[in-house]
Image (cartoon, rainbow, N blue to C red):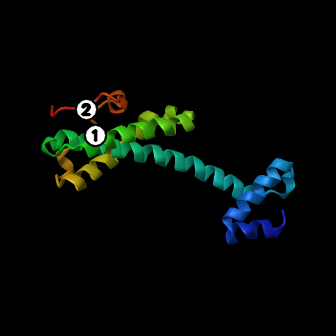
Amino acid sequence: MSPSIAEEYQRDFYAWLIHNAQLLRQGRWSEIDVENVAEELDSMGRSERRELVSRLAVLLAHLLKWVYQPEKRSHSWKYTIEEQRQQVWEVLADSPSLKSQLEEKFLRAYQLATVMAAKETGLAKTHFPSRCPFSLEQTLDDGFYPEAQF
């Protein structure tokens, strides 16, 4: 690998990306910036997992708000819930292997959701259950809008 390819990674990421994609397509394996390509691929995987957790967290935070502030329910909250459900399914459609991590990411997302819900409602974080009161199936069910039951 010539030093200029590795330097290009630091100088102009987009140009580096296009150049390495071209090298891959041409089968010019010895010229590829292998270390940085591998790092970028790892980073893409982490990004997909973060996207899944983020979408689940926003969805769960809005479901918590739905339960704990019923007087403030709005079309906006309902549409956010619908949108986040669709976004979760889209992430899973794009990266089906993430389904095997869904339960684990759901638990992490709930921890983030309680912080978000506390911030948005003004309620103490301890006001929300320490364990998610909704199942994963309920959370992703288009028809599920919980009622106050706690």
**Residue with the mark numbered 2:** 145
Q: Quadrant location of the N terminus?
A: bottom right
Q: Quadrant location of the C terminus?
A: top left
Q: Is residue 33 visible?
A: no
Q: Nearer the viewer, residue 1 or 60?
A: 60
Residue type at numbered disc 1: Lys
Disc sitting over residue 144 in the figure: none
Residue type at numbered disc 2: Tyr
Position in image of residue 67 (x %, y %): 19, 38
Is 9 displayed left or right of 134 in the figure?
Answer: right
Disc sitting over residue 78 in the figure: 1
Position in image of residue 72 (x %, y %): 16, 46
Disc nearest the viewer among 2 and 1: 1
Residue at image coords 32%, 40% = 81
Q: Residue furthest front?
A: 75
Residue at image coords 54%, 49% = 46
Report helix, strand or loop for mark 1.
helix
Q: Does the CB distance between marks 2 and 1 fall below 8 Å?
A: yes
